[in-house]
Image: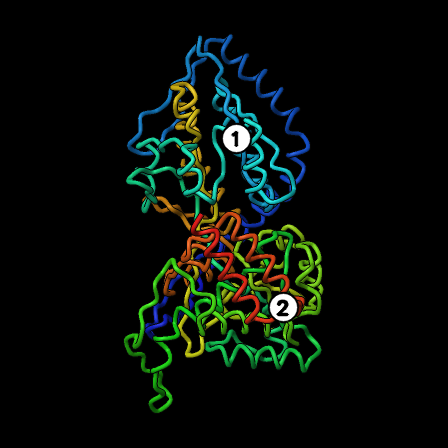
Amino acid sequence: MGHIRKIAVDTNKKIQAEVELSEHSVSIQGEIKVRAEQGQKWRKWQERKRYLFIVGTVFALSGCGAIEQAPEGLEPYTKTEGNEKTQLKVLYSREDITWSLVMDDLCSKFEAENPDIDLELLDSGSGIYEETLKVKEALNEFPDLFEISNVKSYVDNDRLGEIPDSVSSLIEEPESLNQRIYTVPVYTTTYGIIYNHVLFKQYNLEAPKTYEQFLEVCAQLNRHKIAPLVCGGTKEDSVAYWLNYFYQKDVLLIDEEKDVQDIDGDIAEYPAAGKELERGVPDFTSEEYITMLQDYQQLITGKNVLKDSVYMNDSQIISRFLNAQVAMYYTKPSFIANIILADPDCISSMWNNVGKEIEDDKSTVRLAWFFPPTKLGTTIAATEVGAQFAISKECAGDPARYKAAERFFQFLFEDENYREILKSMYGFPTTKKRILYPAPSVQQHLIVDYRYARKEKSFLMANDISGGFQRELTETLSLLAGNAMTAEEAARYLDERWREIRDR
C-alpha cells in the first residue's frame, strides 16, 4: 500500500523531531480520479436534485425509515413518514473551484440521506462573494445558511442567529461575540510557498532557512533563466497574500529580531525588546508598516517575480508552473488541489520503496512546500479561517428550519464528510476530534511543518480587516504592484480610509 519514510522536522527552537509518515499512493490516485470527475457534477445538479427527490419519495412510500449516524455524543436524527419537506436556502462562495465542488457534492449527498430536507443552492456569481451576500440582503433574499467573513457587521445589524450548542460543542475554539456564538468555522488554512522540487534538485537548491537564503535561491534561479516566483491569481484578494509574510517579517517580529545576536554562528533569540504591538489597531503610517508596504512593492515589481503575473488567473499560473517556467508560488495550501487536477502526476512520490530519493527521475514537476522564514530564520505559519458558516436570524426563529440547519452542520462534521473537506482543501481541522486520512507527500510535510511552526493570525485576521476596507486594501496593493503609487502614499491613504471605516 505504501512505505514508511522518516523525515526530520526543524522547529523554530531548533528542536529535531523524527516523524513517521505513511504514503498511501493507491488511495491518493483514487482520490485524484474522484476529484477530476467532480468537475462535471455541477452541470448535472438540477437533474440530480430531481432524481434524489424521486429516490426519497420511493423510500417514503416503501415505509423505510432511515437512521443516520450522528457525531459522537449527539442524538441521531430519525426520518419518519409524514415529515414535511423543509427547505433551506444555502449560499457559499464559488471563488475557489475546489471548495465549490466539494460543497456541491456534500449538499447532494445530504439531500440523498435527508429526503425531508431540500437545499436550495443560491447562485453566488463569479464576483466578490461578500458583495453578493450584501445584495441578497438588500433584495430580501437572505439565505438560511451561508458562508460569512464579516461577522461583526451582521451581528450589529441583528441578522444572525446563534449556532446550536450541539454544533458549537464540536469546535475546539469557537469564536464568540457578545458572549454568543454566531459562526461555525469549517477549517483553518495558512500561507506558504509551493515549489517545484525538480527544479530545486536540478540546480542544487534547498528550501531556505532564512530570508537571505530565500533571496539567494531566487538569484540562482534567475541565473538559470527560471522565474523564481509567480504572483496573482483568480481570487481578488490573492494580490494581498504576500502582505501576510511581510507583516510577520516587518511588523510582528520587528522587536523580537532586532536584538538577536549571532554567537559563533548560532542564533540566540531573546525576549522582545521595545514597544508591544497593539493588535487590532494597524498604524499604516508607522515605520514598521511603511517598511512592510515597501518590501511588498519591491518584491512584486522586482526581478524575482514573473513580469505581469500579478494580473494572471489561476489557470495561467498553473500552466507556467507545470511548464517549469516558474519555480515558486506563495499561496494557500488549497491551491495544491488545483495543480493536481491539471496534472495528477505532480504529487507522485520523489522517494522509492526504501525511502531514498529517486535518482533518475524523469518528471518535470514534483510539488513541495515550505514556510518562508524571517530574517533570522523564525518560521511562522499565518493562520486564517478557511471557511465559516452562519445561520440567519429568520432561520433560527423557525423551529423546522433551525433543526434542519443543525442537522446539516452535524452532517458536515461526520467523519467521512469532514475528511473529504479537509483532504480537498488541504485544510486543518477546527474540531475537537482529530481526523485521519491518506495524503500525498507534499501535504504530509505541510501538516508536520504547520504543527511545529509558530502560529500567528494572518494580517487580515489579526487586525480584524474585512468588508469595505479589505477591498480598499486590495485595490491599493494592486496600485503598488503596478508602481502607480509609492509605499508612503499607500500608507497615508490606507491609514485615512481605515480610520474613516473604523469610526463609522
Element assignment for label 1 = strand
Residue 315: quadrant of the picture = bottom right
Instruction: Name the residue beneath numbered marker 2.
Output: 485
Residue 339 can be seen, yes or no: yes
Q: Quadrant of residue 197?
A: bottom right
Q: Nearer the viewer, residue 238 or 188?
A: 238
Looking at the picture, how far across and down is residue 48, in whole percent?
62, 25
Report helix, strand or loop for mark 2: loop
Residue 384 vertical placement versus 92 (above, below)? below
Which residue is depicted at the point 33% across and 42% down?
Answer: 177
Q: Position of residue 336 (x, y in %)?
A: 57, 55
Would you call the spot at circle 2 few (<14 residues within 10 Å), some (14-19), or many (20 or more)? Answer: some
In percent of width and height, residue 263 lies at 33, 89
Task: Using residue 120 as the reference point, say whether residue 226 is left or right of it.
Answer: right
Near-viewer residue (286 or 6): 286
Is residue 410 or residue 184 the one in the foreground?
184
The amino acid type found where label 1 is placed reads Val
Above or below, 202 against 439 in this view is below
Distance Cα–Cα, label 2 vs label 1: 40 Å
Colour scheme used in the picture?
A: rainbow
* Number of disc labels: 2
Name the disc covering residue 50, or none: none
In the image: residue 326, left or right of residue 155: right
**As drawn, 317 above or below 37:** below
Amino acid residing under circle 2: Met
- What residue lies at 52% left-to-right and 66% top-to-bottom? 492
Which residue is identified by label 1?
Answer: 90
